[in-house]
Amino acid sequence: MTHEKTKNIAGVGILMAIVIVLQLLGSFIRFGPFSISLVLIPIVVGAALYGPLAGGLLGFAFGLVVLLSGDAAAFLAVDIPGTILTVLLKGTLAGVLAGVVYRLFKNSQTLGTVLSAIVCPVTNTGIFLLGCLLFFMPKITEWAQGAGFENVGRFMIVGLVGGNFLAELLTNIILAPIILRIIQIGENKS
């Protein structure tokens, strides 16, 4: 194993530990019924520094923690396979796509970082919404009616993901310069 591979494995391992800790701590910060995903920041950093595969691995770890921590309990009670697929896919694809976007715009590191920081929460939330449509619509319709929403789509956007998505997106955009600096330090140490 080369020195470079060893450094990459160690770097991804450190970021994975950060993902796990942030997700567990983030479960206490809620906007609406779900916790905010603070883990998207180290996922973007890992995807930029180590590539789409590393981003996907970090996103997969995020999904596992969501499943094991109880954050997905309401959905697991409705459809276990649908929940597992949705949760693991949304995290994994968020990391992979953040890495792909960063690589596409690597010549402009600032643009690549900002776009990756945007793509990550958009993908995470988008896959969640698709999973809701595919696996949970009867239950979500019931939740919408119970919450006083006549329009299920409005409930999904406002009631399920609105606050969380905006908080995740704004956090990533605001912290993009810090993310960029971490990436630059990481690349300069190579």
Image (cartoon, rainbow, N blue to C red):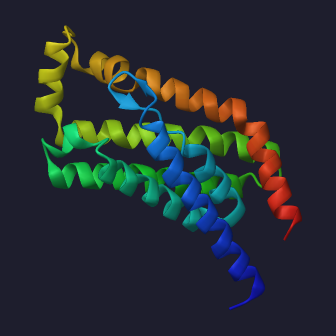
Q: Quadrant of residue 152?
A: top left
Residue 25 lies, in percent from the top left, at: 48, 41
Relative to 61, 12 lies left or right: right
Give 91 or 3, whichever is nearer the viewer: 3
Residue at (36, 17) in percent of width and height:
158
In the image: residue 118, left or right of residue 174: left
State which quarter of the image contains the N terminus.
bottom right
Question: How far across and down, in percent of the image, does residue 136 sit?
Answer: 17, 37
Q: How many marks?
A: 0
Farthest residue, direction right = 188
Q: Position of residue 104 (x, y in %)?
A: 70, 55
Q: Is residue 171 above or below residue 40?
A: above
The front one of 110 and 187 is 187
Q: Is residue 17 above or below residue 5?
A: above
Q: Nearer the viewer, residue 106 or 63?
A: 63
Q: In percent of the image, x 84 and y 54: which residue is there?
A: 184
- Which quarter of the figure has residue 189? bottom right
Q: Is residue 21 above or below residue 7?
A: above
**Image location (x, y in percent) of residue 54:** 58, 65
Look at the image and tell me in which quarter the C terminus lies.
Answer: bottom right
User: In this rendering, is residue 182 above or below 50?
Assistant: above
Q: Is residue 97 left or right of residue 61?
A: right
Point 50% across, 64% down: residue: 57
Seen as rendered, the residue at the extreme bottom is: 1
